[in-house]
Amino acid sequence: MSDTYTPTGAAEQFIEHGEDIHDTKAPSGPIERRWEQRQFDAKLVNAANRRKIKVIVVGTGLAGASAAATLGEAGYHVTSFCYQDSPRRAHSIAAQGGINAAKNYRNDGDSVYRLFYDTVKGGDFRSRESNSYRLAQVSVNIIDQCVAQGVPFAREYGGLLDNRSFGGVQVSRTFYARGQTGQQLLIGAYQALERQVAAGTVEVHTRHEMLDLVMVDGKARGVIVRDMVTGEIESHTADAVVLASGGYGNVYFLSTNAMGCNVTATWRAHRRGAYFGNPCYTQIHPTCIPVSGDYQSKLTLMSESLRNDGRIWVPKKAGDDRHPRDIPEDERDYYLERIYPSFGNLVPRDIASRAAKYQCDDGKGVGPGGLGVYLDFADAIERMGRPAVEAKYGNLFDMYARITGEDPYTEPMRIYPAVHYVMGGLWVDYDLQSNLEGLFVTGEANFSDQGANRLGASALMQGLADGYFVLPTTIANYLAAGPFEPVAEDHPAVLEARQSVEERIRKLLAVDGNRTVDSYHKELGHIMWEYCGMERTEEGLTKAIGLIRELRDDFWKNVKVTGEAEELNQTLERAGRVVDFFELGELMCIDALNREESCGGHFRAESQTEDGEALRHDDRFAYVAAWEFGGEKPILHKEPLEYEYVEMKARSYK
């Protein structure tokens, strides 16, 4: 494929164009001073007034729990919602490998600036400089906060915190707790949250799902939620709303996300006017257990940390079905080490994922269907000894053995890429406020820090940075004008939002067709993976938009939603989420069709270099795509990206 690509403008038939958008809150000046300057410039709320101000936080993962706990500690009255039966079941608990921080404990050349640079480069120069630098700055405080909470990070023999490396970097900056870092960090945040519950500053509502946003005079003032046990629709109002509801990877049906993860909270805010940023930026994780059959409802992640000591390879000969231990060294292709000698097995996730796909496309894949590559620990076990490997990765190895029935200590793991994280989300400014006043968005639910590809171990970093350190400062700047006039439950805006939710539920129950909700979700996921997955083309994306529209029309004619509205009804819950996934999936394909370049996890087959790497077009696409809900056609607003401290250049890990 040539390094040149002639744009066709194929997306124009699907979109309208709006005015450019700008982040007016981002400070100027030296980048290392910008966050400090913003903190000083932000208005404050005195302690007495905080007790009069109410904030709603939707989601209790790392971003939501840390935000609610910190705001509660500051004295605000916080109402927290989660659809799980406990805040501890938020999907953050599934994160395995670690959390980044620029502590330079290994004395290997790390620094705040290097973490900032790695983040911008890893995001393929499609993230904001100011946000990425702030994230790197705040990272050093997160570890101290978590240690103080008792998070049991791994330690070296001398008692100091240990580090390991992750893809896309050449230093060791990832702090970890075996393969269960997310669980340990979430327990820390949960303890902080429950302390505030006991203190009376935070009120937690479990088994409640947000179904709409209440807008009053152009400001976010509340949410409509459904009690998932009784089916009751409830209205809750406040002075500001924080969405920390996670990502939307389950639009693909099969992903590493928990089955309950969905887009409804952010999508309903989008329909109320919040811009959606870069929806097509999806991260495919290279280290997942391959699909084993059509019956699966989710996929299992194997931590990227395994790539520190495991070596990835395939047989050199296509169709070689010998047992891996019967294939001699000279007949193995350690393709990442061969193609990317500087980074080897620790190239970024998007590059490792595409490389695995190419090997399987060439017929060198292993396992059922040829959709797998080997992750081999034989060298590590010989070099370090089995006890050392067990100490670092034991629970991950045990999990793999339970799922596959294979012993990774004696034969290589089989891995294949899968949908994992999304870099897209609601558009926010430097203060984490959406374009809707009073609506703040944190963690994976916003688009802001990761660009077109997230480096490993940066999700936990962003979630805790937003919740513990950024939002509590920036939301105060907005709340300083409060407390605002209370919004009554019979306010016309509240009643309208509530009636909208009730009507949507009635409509779903009234279809009474003959096809299950899950069958529609699975078919949508197949369309998304096939045409908007690891590789996208103009022809495929255009086809996908048509297929999604046809499937959505069929859904509203033939879906069968059993049960009643006023009861525990999981079919109804899933149906509402799939409705939003239909609309999101279409927007993702339109966004991918419009972005006629390859960058990070967004790979357009028409735009690649001679050796198959992503080819950006900075002259035309150095912008954030912020989409406004427009009914028939979404409206595109562009936020230009400018770089003062990092030179935009071809991203290379060779």
Image (cartoon, grey):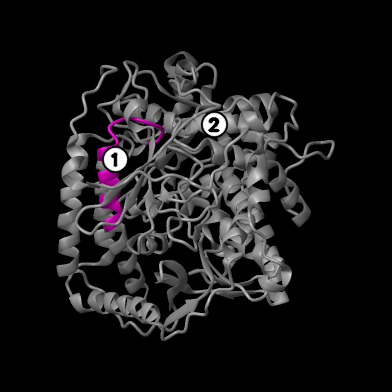
**Quarter that holds the N terminus:** top left
Mark 1 is surrounded, within 10 Å at the Cα level, by few (under 14), some (14 to 19) or many (20 or more) other residues, namely many
* Residue plotted at (62% across, 43% down): 98
* Mark 2: amino acid: Gly
Residue occupied by mark 2: 167
Q: Main secondary structure of the magenta part?
A: helix
* Residue plotted at (57% across, 51% down): 463
Mark 2 is surrounded, within 10 Å at the Cα level, by few (under 14), some (14 to 19) or many (20 or more) other residues, namely many
Horizontal side of residue 372 vs 325, given as left or right: left
User: Residue 402 in the image: x percent, y percent?
Assistant: 52, 50
Mark 1 element type: helix
Residue 620 makes an appearance in the image: yes
Within the image, what quadrant is residue 563 found in? Answer: bottom left
Within the image, what quadrant is residue 478 found in? Answer: bottom right
Question: Of marks 2 and 1, which one's residue comes earlier in the chain?
Answer: 2
Residue occupied by mark 1: 592
Mark 2 element type: loop
Q: Which mark is residue 56?
A: none
Most extreme residue toward the top, as rendered? 330
* Mark 1: amino acid: Ala
* Magenta region: 583-601
Horizontal side of residue 13 vs 423, given as left or right: left
Nearest the viewer among 415 and 115 is 115
Question: What is the distance, in whole Å, between disc 2 and disc 1 at their CAs?
Answer: 25 Å
Residue 616 makes an appearance in the image: no
